Amino acid sequence: MQVDIAVIGGGFSAVATVINVLDRLGQDTTVALVSRKSGLGRGVAYSTTEPWHRLNVPAGRMSLLADKPDHLCEWLAEEATEFGAEDFIPRQLYGRYLQDTLADRLLRADNSAQVWLVDAEVLDCEQLTDEQQVYHLSDGQLLHAKKSIFCIGGTPAGLPVAPEKLAPEARSRICLNVWSDPWMEKTDPNDEIVMLGSGLTMIDQVLSLKARRHQGRIQVISRHGLTPLPHRVPRSHPVAPTFEPGSKPLSGMMKALREAASKAEDWRAVVDGLRPITQSLWQHLSTSERARFLRHANAWWSIHRHRLAPDMWESFSQLRQSGQVSVAAGWLREVYQADGKVRSAYFDRHSRTLRQISSDWLINCTGMDRCSISKTPLLKKMSSRGMIRSDVMGLGLAVDQESRLINEVGEASRSAFALGPMTVGQFFEIFAVPDIRVQAAAVAGRIAKELS
Ligand SMILES: Cc1cc2nc3c(=O)[nH]c(=O)nc-3n(C[C@H](O)[C@H](O)[C@H](O)COP(=O)(O)OP(=O)(O)OC[C@H]3O[C@@H](n4cnc5c(N)ncnc54)[C@H](O)[C@@H]3O)c2cc1C
């Protein structure tokens, strides 16, 4: 099979890319969308079937298309849902929006590019010439493409404990991947649960337990013990930052932000005001400043930046106030089995002592891992061929400002691009829909120009 463009992946990034390509290229162009799972368009984020798993960004800012900001709200109205621009809609519904929009675009009889949906995993990729890659697919086929866009996301993070410190006997009471293991179905309402990680993944799991009228204690452990903060509705108008990218060292920027937040009516306005320049701020930091930011400030940045719908925050806060949910700060050291229970030993951040908690279940809520070459078989093979390398910080794949993959000798590819969380090292803020959709439009635009 030979195509002009191969898009690898089946989540948001892939859908946004294909739609942008269709908007730019005519019917003499062929595109293969290669995805290994059913549920095309949803990816990990939007595959949930639980109605209380909701977006953490209001619908008014979650359009799939950067140039049509009202697209999602129009779809919600056409579908006669009760939701509007300020609502944090169920992620399941958002997944349907992505699938519907893709299907609608593919079925539209116009002169745009032809798309083949290929239900397979990409096992390997070789670079034949500057403008020709060949993919080895899990169904045995070979796919040749002139241009490639990798949209394969990250992988669920493992438990942050050395393998030899995880007793195999305890394994049956541990959920390593909350998105593929239906662990809640095995629980009793009075079971005691330990959750590792205190971000949005943990909130999803706690609210699912609440909806099932779970009564048992839930103890959360994370390195900083910080939990996401709420949005405010209506949103305060963003406040423009008082500095330009590169104009201050990291410490100076943090100071200016703290000052601005203390003067603002709502600190969220200061955080939101940074949004247009966050990628540029990151790119102007030196490698050591980036490392310092990740070590000391990222956990704080995350809870202020990745906020929760106010009513979800309220539900979670009530569970904390009632004592059913508690949050500790510390590092997991060892997991073993004792008296038929899981025993988690962790080093407490505040008391600097080793503590132990006994529970019926240990649930890994540490979220998505960085896109690591060593943990992704396809990337490992591409790396061994010299086609890709990690970014300097080891967060994802090295790409240039145009999202082109960079090979082992530092050359930017003429034909292969990466999108979404895989490009975090270059762009930092590239996880959420409002950022990925801009990247997808830009990459599709570049490819369209080069092919025509
Ligand atoms: C639980 C969760 C909730 C989120 N909520 C929000 C939100 O409310 N608002 C927001 O803006 N952002 C949210 N995000 C972030 C954001 O939407 C994601 O970062 C985005 O969906 C990433 O999409 P992706 O397509 O790059 O990756 P993914 O969604 O991870 O998709 C990757 C796809 O590639 C496929 N794939 C991988 N390897 C191969 C291979 N070798 N061959 C073929 N296919 C392959 C996978 O099967 C998968 O379909 C959320 C993220 C998560 C995890």
Image (cartoon, grey):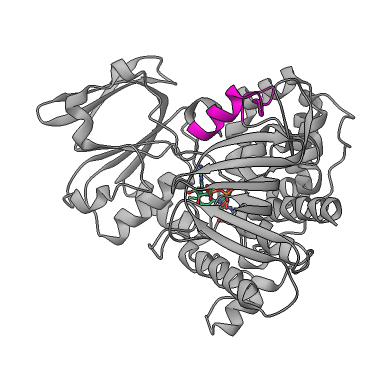
Q: Quadrant of residue 282?
A: top right
Identify which residue, 146 or 352, lies in the foreground. Answer: 146
Q: Vertical placement of 373 versus 36: above or below?
A: above
Image side of residue 305 versus residue 274, left or right: left
Q: Magenta residues?
A: 376-395
Identify which residue, 444 or 138, lies in the foreground. Answer: 138
Residue 147: x and y in percent read 72, 47
* Residue 376 visible, this angle: no
Question: Which residue is rendered at x = 75% and y = 30% of the image?
Answer: 254
Identify which residue, 110 or 236, lies in the foreground. Answer: 110
Question: Which residue is rendered at x = 36% and y = 45% of the image?
Answer: 178
* Residue 250 visible, this angle: yes
Report the quarter where the C terminus lies: bottom right
Identify which residue, 224 or 245, lies in the foreground. Answer: 245
Residue 419: x and y in percent read 67, 45
Residue 237: x and y in percent read 77, 59
Residue 337: x and y in percent read 17, 25
Question: Which residue is rendered at x = 48% and y = 54% of the image?
Answer: 313
Give the prevailing secondary structure in the magenta stretch.
loop
Does the segment drawn in magenta span residue 155?
no
Image side of residue 366 versus residue 21, left or right: left
Image side of residue 321 versus residue 151, left or right: left
Q: How many marks?
A: 0
